Image: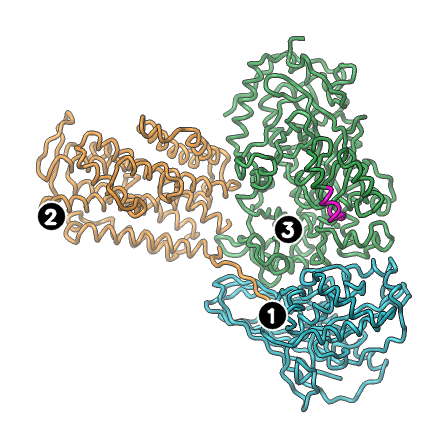
Chain colours: A cyan, B orange, C green
Amino acid sequence: MRLDIRYTTRFDYDAPVAESQNELRACPASDDRQALLHYNVTTSPRSRVAWYSDHWGTRVDTFGIRQPHGSLEVVAEATVETWPQALITAAPTRAMLEDADFRDGHLEFLSPSLHVEPGPDVVAAAQQAAEVAGDDVIGAALAVHRTVSSALTYAPGETYVGVGVDEVFGCGRGVCQDFAHLAVAMYRSLGIPARYVSGFLYAADDATGAEVVGDEVEVQTHAWVEVAIPTGDPRRGRGATWLALDPTNRLEVGEQHVTIGRGRDYDDVAPFRGVFSGRSDHELSVSVGMRRLAVEPTDEPAGRSAVRQQEKVQQRQAQQQ
Amino acid sequence: MLARLAENLFWAGRYLERAEDTTRMVDVTYHTLLESPASEATGSWEQLLEVLHLREAYGDGPIDPARVVRLLVLDRDQAGSITASIEAARENIRSVRELVSSELWESVNDLHLALGRRDLRRDLADQPYELFGHIRRSCMTIYGTASETMPRDDGWRFMALGRVLERAEMTCRLLDVRFSQLERLAGPSDRLGALRTDEDGSVEVARGPDRADFHAWIAVLKSASAFEAYRRRYRSSMDPADVVEFLLLAPDLPRSVVFCLGTAQQLLEDLSDGRPSRAVRRVGRCRASLQYRDVGELFEVGLHEFLAQVQERINDIASDAADEFFRQHPSGALHAIATS
Amino acid sequence: MGDLFSGYEDGGFFDEAFEPSGAVRPHYEAVVARLRGFSPDDLDRRERIRDQLFRSQGITFTVYGDVAAGSGRPEDAGVERTFPMDLLPRVIPASEWEVIERGVAQRVTALNRFLEDLYVGEQAAIHDRVVPRWLVQTAEGFRREAFGIPVPHAARCLVSGVDLVRDGDGTYVVLEDNLRNPSGISYVLENRAAMTRVLPHAFASQRVRPVDHYGPMLLRALREVAPPAAGEQPRAVVLTPGAHNSAYFEHAFLARQMGIELVEGRDLVVDEHVVYLRSTKGLQRVDVIYRRIDDEFLDPVVFRPDSALGVPGLLSAARAGNVTLANAVGNGVADDKAVYAFVPDLIRFYLGEEPILPNVETYLLWDAEQRAEVLDRLGELVVKPVAASGGYGMLIGPTASDEEVARFRERITADPRGYIAQEVIALSRHPTLIGDRIEGRHVDLRPFAIAGESVEVVPGGLTRVALQRGSLIVNSSQGGGSKDTWVLDDEGAGIDAPAATDDPAEVA
């Protein structure tokens, strides 16, 4: 699926701001499931945007404004080609999770993190969910996925960034971020490495992931999870392949999901971070527009390598700027 | 140089001057009043509080001279008190230590430490003269040290600028309050009443309200370290118009407003590399408007109004200078933003 | 002997100045002879001169509230105190120093290689299992935000302080590394300046290696690590948290020694990924920042958003290669006290050499076996939190109360990664003036290394002395004092004690 994305963040300040410095994490990643074809960030007032890949591999665009401004608008435009997830054919056992090298290689996604510090209730619920799957890791992963989907009701505006997973689990309501944090917490408590994914979802409804009618849609940034499934082959990918699940929509991640970045939790992939000097009052508005492009489906893997090539050229150009 | 440090030096100059001027005023008021009727004391101390913009800080309740002195001298938490000004000067110099000579830092730190070692309450009760003298001399030593050890670079200029602007303002305030007092005590026709001292120093009231005025005018001059110079120039006459002329307009008296503005103008010109910046133009105009004034005219338009105007202009000069040199120094607080 | 040294005992410890027989060690002969000639009045006078020198220089440090409370003297909270310099210098003969110098340089070189590899390299030490991956990832000082930030010449620890102590045999061992913002060099220089005034003739009788080139040395290293794009005369600045920081005196002192600007975060601004000074004449470009602000306060965009000490956008400028930060961000991972245990292996791994200076034997408490043994012998060991410095939060088993030991037992059990345990080192002692007599007190030594294109060690370093009888804690924040530290150009033996006409220089 080829998608155009236009991600706009706008700040309106009550009083002019003299200086601001910011980081944006909004660039679709290139990986086994998607390829970035085009990406561009513009700011108003204008600024020189530089970028780097952070520790987690996410592209970060950084820029500062040094002239007094009453508002700041940042527009990130991307074109991305996505494919469905590859099928995992292996059937690893829970015992493989105990492998010392496997654990060491995924320690960051096994340990508690800023927003993922589950209490006993969450841990117990995870264990209960996984029980039905017995020794099967993938079965356990799917069981937790379903448990989280059922445990929470999608309720925008009722939680805040930084709410604990226990509280979310207790009240049973939240947004995609809360679904993802709860799922990550449960996986880690079972010894299954799990990471938080930030991205976009091309869907008519955030809560259900319903199909889009027409080719343009106004969406929001989205979040889901990836769990590490042991492959038993430590030479590749630290012995894991990743299974991506969207607990908010009780979906396996597919073509309509566009990944930006991955981390231990929200804090590692927050889309926008900044500091400005001046009075504190400001209004924030964020919008994401996605459009499906009509193109001939590309052949795998030839098509994929072609877009990879294109993307490399673009990266090199960007680095030279 | 760093905009922030320039600003700190500017304020170091202001605070040191403020500490010194405040000490002079407290000292002279205190010792003048020793020879005056007790009834005058209350009024004079209240005047001083007003000069220093500390009348409100003193609070309600009757004016108790001992309490006023404690507030003006000892109260570290009261901005404008002598100890607070010295503290502020030291903090400012401490933050610019790498720009000033060690000797300058040592001299201001010595004063700070010396005050810390003394039992100031007892000093005030027993021998305030010695204490005030110590502070006054220390302040002059600090300036002397700065003057002898600092290269005449921008750092020096900012400090000197703070000092002369503060001094010009303090001199205005001093005159203003004395005149308001006189106007309250006597009718307008008496305000030019002259006093004379004989060659041997004894006092003769020539015209004017009473003996208290005489003391008040001597106190004004002494506060500005100008009594002796005044006597040399005007001999035995003690005419308020002369005092005003001397303190406002004397081109050669280091504490006169005109002298201070002249110095400020030179400093600002040097700091602006000869560009006619706003601050330079403003100080030039202000000085010109004073320089050729006839004192009689001032009394016609109303001295209080005039002094208020001059003070306002001095403030404008200071804020023009701040705009030009300290503007890179950000004032706004930093705020973090994040989106979900 | 009716002199200051009468009744002096080594207490069974290794004494820096005296041999077990009571004979003066050759390199101390001159100093001891001079002091023996002093009357109590002579000493008194010299102490007064010293005190006046330090006070009028405003050489103070702030004792933080929580620490003072920990020391049981809450009334001292937040007060400024001077760091007392003992009148007896510590003397190190050339041959001893040569080993220390090589050992410290070796250690710093290896640690720089490790950090470079970790943040911009292949992480070979992790892949080859020299250091456990998890240990690195769980180190408090490990900064994922520092990935990809270049440092010319890999001089990530541009200034380091390696704390050494001597054990019962007099062997120098490394107690800990300080790779983030080691402080104390200003005391080294000020102590020397004071000693040359207080005991001028003592220097004339021996060839003591100078320390006053530290400023130029540091400035040269800072300029060496300037980004390649900086011009011939890169602009370096010292970045301080401000006048209220406990080490502010040192920040100002170093800026003055180097003749460069001392700036606070608010004096700098980032524009298009370039750092500028806010000056009275507009913005001026900055190439190198010797920052004395902790990592997490450096840049509120990346680290603590509530920090007003740092510079928004600073890390993006560093990453763009437009400014170099010294010390580099994330060095704390290498001076973590558990990672410390692996430094000898890192030296072997990166340099292919045997460590010249040994570590103190260290127990890693996540290892169940080691932990059990440590918990058994807790009252005999020293326990330290892995990420702290300044002697904070330590347990000294032999002198601790039962409650303290019990408290540490709980802490270790709850957070085994958070602590390490070490055998108690019978720290060497040094004659120290206590009141009007001389007694032995425990000392350590912090030599300072500077890394630019190469690593250099400043002769001597800071000798800290625990002024309380029997105490092993030498930190300035915990009631320690300091000594001028002399590195001799030779072995110091065979020098006649000069005539005792040693008048202190008049102090202006």
- The Cα–Cα distance between marks 3 and 2, rounded to whole angstroms, is 67 Å
Q: Which residues are magenta?
A: C409-418
Residue type highlighted by circle 3: Val
x 64%, y 11%: residue: C3
In which image quadrant can residue B14 be found? top left
Instruction: Name the dominant secondary structure of the magenta segment.
Output: helix
Q: Chain of mark 3?
A: C
Q: Chain of mark 1?
A: A
Q: Nearer the viewer, mark 1 or mark 3?
A: 1
Residue type highlighted by circle 2: Pro
* Image height of C378 relative to B284, above or below: above
Residue C387 relative to residue B337: left or right? right
Q: Are marks 2 and 1 on the same chain?
A: no
In which image quadrant can residue A255 be found? bottom right
The residue beneath circle 3 is C288
- The Cα–Cα distance between marks 2 and 1, rounded to whole angstroms, is 73 Å
Mark identifier at residue A159: 1
Residue type highlighted by circle 1: Thr
- The Cα–Cα distance between marks 1 and 3, rounded to whole angstroms, is 44 Å
Where is residue B98 drawn, in percent x and y?
A: 53, 41
Whether residue C163 is visible, yes or no, is yes
Q: Looking at the picture, tell me which residue is in the foreground, A81 or A68.
A: A81
Q: Looking at the picture, tell me which residue is in the foreground, B280 or C439.
A: C439
The residue beneath circle 2 is B188
Whether residue A57 is visible, yes or no, is no
Where is residue B162 drawn, in percent x and y?
A: 39, 46
Q: Chain of mark 2?
A: B
